[in-house]
Amino acid sequence: MASTSEDKPEKKAPAKASGAKSETKSTKSTETWKPTAESKSKATQFRVIAAILWVLAIAGEVAGIFWLLKQGRPVGDVDASKYTRDDATGLLTQGDVAAREFPTWAFVALIVLLVVIAALSIIGSMLWKKANKLDPASKEDKVRFFVQNQLGAIIAIVAFLPLIIMIFLNKDMNGAQKGIAGALGIVLAVVATYLGISFNPPSVEQYTADQSAVIQLLGQDHVYWVAGGKVYHVCNEVSDIQNASSEQGDGTTAEAIEAGKIRLTLELRSELNACGLPVPENVDDIVAALRTIQDGQTDTVLPQPVYADGVTPPLQLGNG
C-alpha cells in the first residue's frame, strides 16, 4: 500500500508539464507586434476619411457619366415632317436628325471634374497608406494583405476607367474634345493608380521581427528616435540622435511606429558599441535577415544572437 501511495504524486507530473507547455504557448501568442491604442485610433480615422474621399470620387464619376456627358444639344432645326420611302423594305424613314454638339461649359466642367476625382483619389490613397503604416495587415492572409495595401490603386481604376470609356464613346463630343478629355483622364488615372500602389507595404510580421530583434539585443522593448528621422535606434548615444535638432523620443517599438518611424535601424553593430552593449558575434547575419524581412521577405528566419564566451546575453532565452 505504501508503494501505491508513493506512486500517486508521480502521476500528476505530466499534468504540470502540460500546464507549463500551455503557459509557454500563451506567452508566445503575446509576442506578435501590436499597435498602440493611439495608433489604432489614428489608423481608423485616416481610413474613414479616405473612404469618404473615395466615395466622393466615385460619386463624381457617376455624375459625370449620367449627367455631364448627357449635356449634348442639337444644332439647327429638325424637320420631322419629311418622310422618305425605303424601296428595299417599303418602310418610311423620318427626315435627317440635326447634328449635335457638346457645350463648352460642359466640356470645361468635365475637365475640372477629372482633376477633382484625381485629387480625391490621391489624397485618400495617401491617408490609407498612413493608416497601413500605423496598423498593418498580416501576410498570413494573402488576399486581405493584398487588398488592404493596394486598395488605393483599385479605387483609382474604378473611379476613372468607366468615365474614360464613356468619354470616348460619347457621340456629342467632337474629336478635339474627346482627345483632350480622354488624354487628361488617362494621365490622371495612371498617376492616381501609381500613387495608390504600395510597393513595399509594412506587415505585422515585419514589425514583429524588428521588435524581436530589439528585445533579444537589449533585453527589453525600448528604443530611441528623433522627430525628423524615419528609423528608430537601439542606442541614444549615436550621432543621429545626439546631433539632431528635432525633438528626441523613446519608448517601445509600437510607440516608435506611432511616432512615424517605419523600421529598426540596420546599423546595429555601431549602435551597440556606442552604448557599450554586448555585440553578438553573428550581428551581420541578424542585420542581413532584418534587411530581407524589411524588404518584404517575412518568411526569413531571424537568427538568435550568439555571444562570445564570458559575455552575458541581455536576454536569457528558453527552449523553443
Image (spheres, helix red, strand yellow):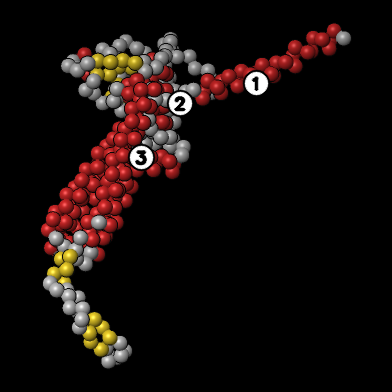
The residue located at (60%, 21%) in the rendering is 21
In depth, the one of 152 and 207 nearer the eye is 152
Taking the image as shown, residue 190 lies to the left or right of residue 251, namely: left
Location of residue 171 in the rendering, given as x and y in whole percent from the top left corner:
21, 67
SS for dot 1: helix
For badge 3, the amino acid type reads: Asn
Q: Nearer the viewer, mark 1 or mark 2?
A: 2
Q: Residue furthest top?
A: 2
* Between discs 3 and 2, the one toward the N terminus: 2
Q: Quadrant of residue 116?
A: top left
The span from disc 1 to disc 2 (Cα, nearest Å) is: 23 Å
The span from disc 3 to disc 2 (Cα, nearest Å) is: 20 Å
For badge 2, the amino acid type reads: Thr
Q: Which residue is mark 2?
A: 32
SS for dot 3: helix
Q: Which residue is mark 3?
A: 149
For label 3, the crowd category at 10 Å Cα-Cα, with few meaning under 14, some 14 to 19 and many 20 or more, is many
The residue located at (34%, 16%) in the rendering is 251
In depth, the one of 30 and 147 nearer the eye is 147
Q: Residue furthest right?
A: 1
Q: Which residue is mark 1?
A: 18
* Between discs 3 and 1, the one toward the N terminus: 1
